[in-house]
Amino acid sequence: MNTPNPIANVLTIAGSDPCGGAGIQADLKTFSALGTYGTSVITALTAQSTAGVTGVHAVPTDFIAAQLDTLMDDVHLDGVKIGMVASRDVAMTIRECLERHRPRWIVLDPVMVAKSGDVLVDDAGIHAVREILVPLADLITPNLPEAAVLLNSDTPQDRAAMEELLPRLTHLGATNVLLKGGHLQGDRCPDLLGGDTPMQWLDLPRIPTDNLHGTGCTLSSAITAYLARGHLLPDAVADAKRWLSDALTASECLHVGKGHGPVHHFHAWW
């Protein structure tokens, strides 16, 4: 009798989103939809809906460390996704725990800029992500405004500028970078992958929908799930993009909130 391959265990370190479209909730849905076992460590509670964020309650760093160490002393993790980190103390706590219990894959989604263009973290938080977490990551997944914040530069406006910017991001210490080009104009969503893997474009049609809440969280957690399942990095990114495109297409059957709704994480199931 053949023994089946064990299901990969993955972890999300992020904030909680009560409406379920982003953060911890979106990551756990993504992990489950893609055939991995999801675990979570919460760094912040938010008062949030599809219309926006009205409050944030940070979890004390000693309790974040307790969550991480208690989980990782017990559970073997094949991949970790890190979401928004708003302070240097939280960033250092995460780094120290992950260095003690090094998983095979670490994916960092440097959530720093809202869709409105507002910067979500202060200068200390930006420095913490850049100096403490980026060098720890096997892959970072900034969108164009986030890349500009990380580099203190102008936001790229075309593909040529993206190609010029990507090596500067790898010089921050990340092994690989997925520079997401969804903010560019046009009917395509071009993302640029590079670093240890050769530079390559991953390009899919733009899905005409307003249900964009949590797309960045969902993409990075999908990549983490595919990596944990054993996919090579370029394949994991390409598969995650296709899966997210299908989730965006299917999102029109959901009716969640009055603002930007979520993607349909379980489009392949129901």
Image: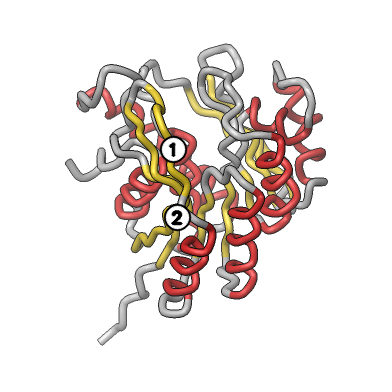
Circle 2: element type: strand
Circle 1: element type: strand
Amino acid at circle 2:
Thr
- Residue 95 in percent (x, y) is at 64, 62
Q: Which residue is drawn at 64% across and 31% down?
A: 146
- The label on residue 73 is none
Q: Quadrant of the C terminus?
A: top left
Question: Which of the pair 131/216 is nearer the observer?
Answer: 131
Q: Marks 1 and 2: in contact by CB < 8 Å?
A: no
For marks 2 and 1, the one nearer the N-term is 2
Amino acid at circle 1:
Val
Query: What residue would you read off at disc 2?
Result: 12
Colour scheme in use: secondary structure
Above or below residue 264? Residue 259 is above
- Residue 171 in percent (x, y) is at 82, 46
How many numbered circles does the render carry?
Answer: 2
- Residue 102 in percent (x, y) is at 60, 71
Query: What residue would you read off at disc 1?
Result: 56
Q: How far is mark 2 from mark 1, CA to CA?
A: 18 Å
Disc 2 vs disc 1: which is toward the camera? 1
Q: Which residue lies furthest to the left in this view?
A: 270
Question: Which of the pair 125/194 is nearer the observer?
Answer: 125
